[in-house]
Amino acid sequence: MAREVGRDQPRRVLADFRDLAVRVEQNVSDGEFSVNRYTSTGTQVSTGRSYAVTSMDMVRVRDGRVVEHWALTDVPDRAAQLRAGA
């Protein structure tokens, strides 16, 4: 049961945002690896506040499938932009 509840959490969080978008700023690929620098934006429905943060991720693809994924996002910056009075 706990696993099922956990699976719903991302959907509940995303449901509070509208106009979510991701813009890839740069992509570098070499062999099995692809690195992306991107900006994600969105507006929180419950507060009307928007955010824009730059993030990076790296994926490793083997036989057409993502076998590893690493991501770095400035979560504190996003939280500060969405915080009341920010």
Image (cartoon, grey):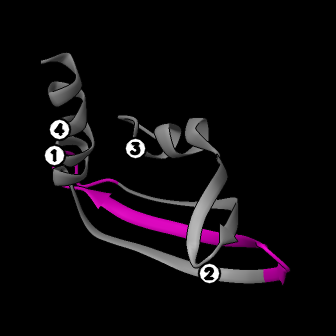
> Which circle's residue, 3 or 2, is located before the other in the chain?
2
In terms of secondary structure, where does tag 2 sit?
strand
Q: For marks 3 and 2, give the one nearer the viewer.
A: 2
Quarter the N terminus occupies: top left
> Which circle's residue, 2 or 1, is located before the other in the chain?
2
Residue 43, position in %: x, y? Answer: 30, 61
> Which circle's residue, 4 or 2, is located before the other in the chain?
4
Look at mark 1 in the image and give the residue it sits on.
46
The structure residue drawn at horizontal position 19% and vertical position 17%, both measured from the top left corner, is: 2
> Which circle's residue, 1 or 3, is located before the other in the chain?
1
Nearer the observer, 26 or 28: 28
- Amino acid type, residue under disc 4 in the picture: Asp
Nearer the observer, 74 or 12: 12
- Amino acid type, residue under disc 2 in the picture: Val
* Residue 47 within the magenta-colored segment of the rendering: yes
Dot label at residue 8: 4
Residue 50, position in %: x, y? Answer: 38, 59
Residue 64, position in %: x, y? Answer: 57, 79
Figure disc tally: 4
Residue 32, picture quadrant: bottom right
The structure residue drawn at horizontal position 68% and vertical position 60%, both measured from the top left corner, is: 57
User: Magenta residues, as a range?
Assistant: 28-49
Q: For marks 3 and 4, give the one nearer the viewer.
A: 4
The structure residue drawn at horizontal position 55% and vertical position 80%, both measured from the top left corner, is: 23
Nearer the observer, 56 or 6: 6
Look at mark 2 in the image and give the residue it sits on.
24
Q: Residue furthest left?
A: 1
Q: For marks 2 and 1, give the one nearer the viewer.
A: 2
